[in-house]
Amino acid sequence: MAQFLWQDREQREYVYPFNPRPECLAMIQRPPTVALDIGCGSGGVGHALRERFPDCQTWGCEFNASAAQIARQHFDFVVEQDVESVDFAALGLTKPFDLVCLFDVLEHLVNPWQLLHGLSRMVAPDAQVLVSLPNVSNLPLLYDALRGHWKYGSWGLLDFTHLRFFTDFDARKMFYQAGYRVLDHRLNFIGAGRDIFERHQGTDFPTTLFVGDMSLKVASRHDLALLCADQNLYLISPHHGEFANDAERELASNHYPPVYAFGGGS
């Protein structure tokens, strides 16, 4: 039996849960005709899409062979290779994807910006792209970090296989720089932050929040929600270099607000 997490993950095959992600699929604004689930696992999302949109052609992309084999029961097509290297036309795709699902995938990649940018060649001009990302500005996580602990686990915000970490702001910068605009943003509460949010959401803001031996001034209920959520959920779509306002143009730029870590504090 492995003693450490890093040994255990190397020795045991990861079991992919059958998760249809209803909280993400609820963000779909119009019925898709051709859908792609990148990192489709054992096929929970494909199963849900078939039930909800029976006329939609469903594709899955999954590296893990055993998970891909199970997923084939729930998708019309499942490929076992890097999505950016797949010749979908050669496999029978006749029209671009108008729905793409990226559920807890981007944080596992060395260059998620590149993947998002590369998707533009295979999606419809008005494609709906659904993204779920762990929220690294989660207050229980930050509390542990301030106490000197950054504890990796087998799952969750600090899954041992995560390579990238995003706040809501940084996720939006990534989307706009890669060619997408945010149409909808929702929060998913799973862990300890949910209890904090439920206890304090009815408080008059601004308020001082006490977590363990730390106190934090929180300006609004929205800020509290961003601090307590475990996942940021997004519906994004290609912007084709056209921006609705200066805020979108700023997100798409290389500009970044001053930050303490790089000398921006006062």
Image (cartoon, helix red, strand yellow):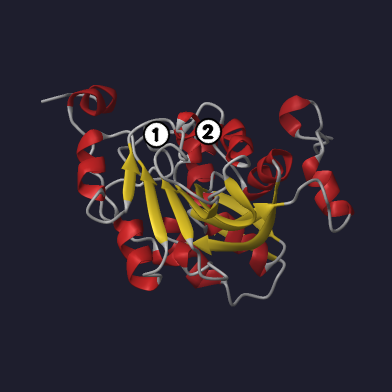
Q: What residue type is labelled 2?
A: Arg
In the picture of the structure, the residue carrying the numbered disc 2 is: 164
Q: In this rendering, is residue 86 above or below 247?
A: above
Is 105 in front, or is 179? 179
Q: Position of residue 143 (x, y in %)?
A: 52, 44
Residue found at x 23% / y 22%: 7
Kindly identify which numbered label has been placed on residue 151. Answer: 1
Q: Give the tally of numbered discs.
A: 2
Q: Nearer the viewer, mark 1 or mark 2?
A: 2
Is 110 in front, or is 195? 110
Q: Position of residue 251 (x, y in %)?
A: 78, 45
Q: Which amino acid does label 1 sit on?
A: Lys
Considering the image in quadrants, where does the C terminus appear?
A: top right
- Mark 1: few/some/many CA within 10 Å (<14, 14-19, 20+): few
Most extreme residue toward the left is 1
Considering the image in quadrants, where does the N terminus appear?
A: top left
- Please tell me whether mark 1 sits on a helix, a strand or a loop: loop
Residue 211 seen anywhere in this rendered image of the structure: no
Residue 12 seen anywhere in this rendered image of the structure: yes
Q: Could you tell which of marks 1 and 2 lies nearer the N-terminus?
A: 1
